[in-house]
Amino acid sequence: MFRTADLSCLPAEVASHARNVQDWDRVIVMSDRELASVQLARALRGAQADVPAAVVEELRRKAVTIELRMQYLSRRLQQTCGILAERGISHVLLKGAAVGALVDPTLCTRPMNDGDILVRPEDAERAAEALEAAGWFATPDEVLRGLLAGAHHLPPFLDTQMPGLRVELHVSHLPFDHPFVFDTAMLWREARPAPPPFSGTLVPSAEHLVLHAAIHFTWQHPMSFGAWRTFRVVSIMSRRPDFDWARLARLAQQTKGTTACYWTLRLGQRMAGIAVPPTVVRDLAPPTPAWLLDALERHFVAMIAVGEMPASPSLWVNRRLWFLAIRPRWSGHATTRDWDPGNRWGRAYGVVSSESAWSKYVRHVAGYRRWTAFLARTFIR
């Protein structure tokens, strides 16, 4: 499933992998989680792979649903960007929307849950009015509005016709407390005009798109999900004639995003087979023993690939391993990361239960087999 993120994946390779699949239900779960159903369905169809008919049909239905949503989102984004341009509001498409504007206006090449648009802080109010003029409406969820007060993007704007579809209006491409030397001004300086049908809109440079994707994946989603979409961005952007691997490595080092890029590229190589120049990986690698880098790689693969066992049964251990991988102090940025936002959101919506220290102890002792398997697989293998 992850191999389909790479544009160089050939039909014969897809067919070979498909013959070895033992659990198609797990493949479908992962493709749902990673928004990869469209590309997976296309790859299997193009390879004429021997896949159970029920799986083919389920993937086809999921792919059609996503394609329809992406094509609708594309039209809505084009309308919205047109209104922003008419009102003289400079704006930059981010993440999947930017990739789509560059290579596939249907947005099916790199699907997404929402469209992200960056505007300057002083234009935020006028941009919000423009979105409402385009038919979007601000979320009525008061809890969500309170949680996002003062955040790097406004509360989401929803579509009246397509449930669940939304746009996020950003005033910064990263949270304000991020520790990287990668500010919004850098993004604006190198942004260039998007091709039709997104004329009048700006998109980041290819290297900035990859760097932003790497930071988003490793820091905001600490290498636990969103991997396929991130690998897809790396594969697409790295094949463009204006992309420069050496410049990406320099940018990563200059912005203190060295380990963020390193782990994105390393996992992209391992899980999606993306070709990365060896010199780039070597230049970005932290001074960590090779055996520990290998162990950390196995851990993150287990975190990303749903059903890959054994992953660590402890959130605290997962955090410690993340710190070992990212090495904030060596990278030159903050030595701490705010792990609370997830719990804060969960508490706000009443989905986080409190558990006593004794209950946690009993739970972990009872799961000693998982601990033994995790340690053996990750560190002794």
Image (spheres, rainbow, N blue to C red):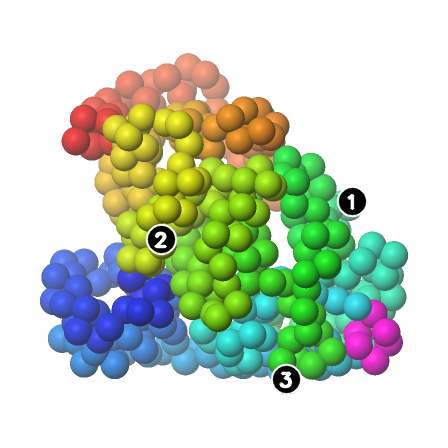
Say above or below: 251 vs 180. Answer: below
Q: Earlier in the sequence, mark 3 or mark 1?
A: 1
- Going by the numbered disc 1, the residue's amino acid type is Gly
Tell me, yes or no, if residue 120 can be seen here.
yes
- Going by the numbered disc 2, the residue's amino acid type is Pro
Give the crowd class for mark 1: few <14, some 14-19, many >=20 residues within 10 Å: few
Gap between marks 3 and 2 measured at Cα: 32 Å
Q: Where residue 53 is drawn, which disc sits there?
A: none
Query: What element does badge 3 sit on?
Result: loop
Report the mark closest to the observer, 3 or 2.
2
Range shown magenta: 84-89
- Going by the numbered disc 3, the residue's amino acid type is Pro
Residue on which disc 3 sits: 196
> CB under 8 Å between callouts 2 and 1?
no
In percent of width and height, residue 267 lies at 35, 47
Residue on which disc 1 sits: 150
Q: Residue at x 32, y 78 (%)?
A: 42
Give the crowd class for mark 3: few <14, some 14-19, many >=20 residues within 10 Å: few
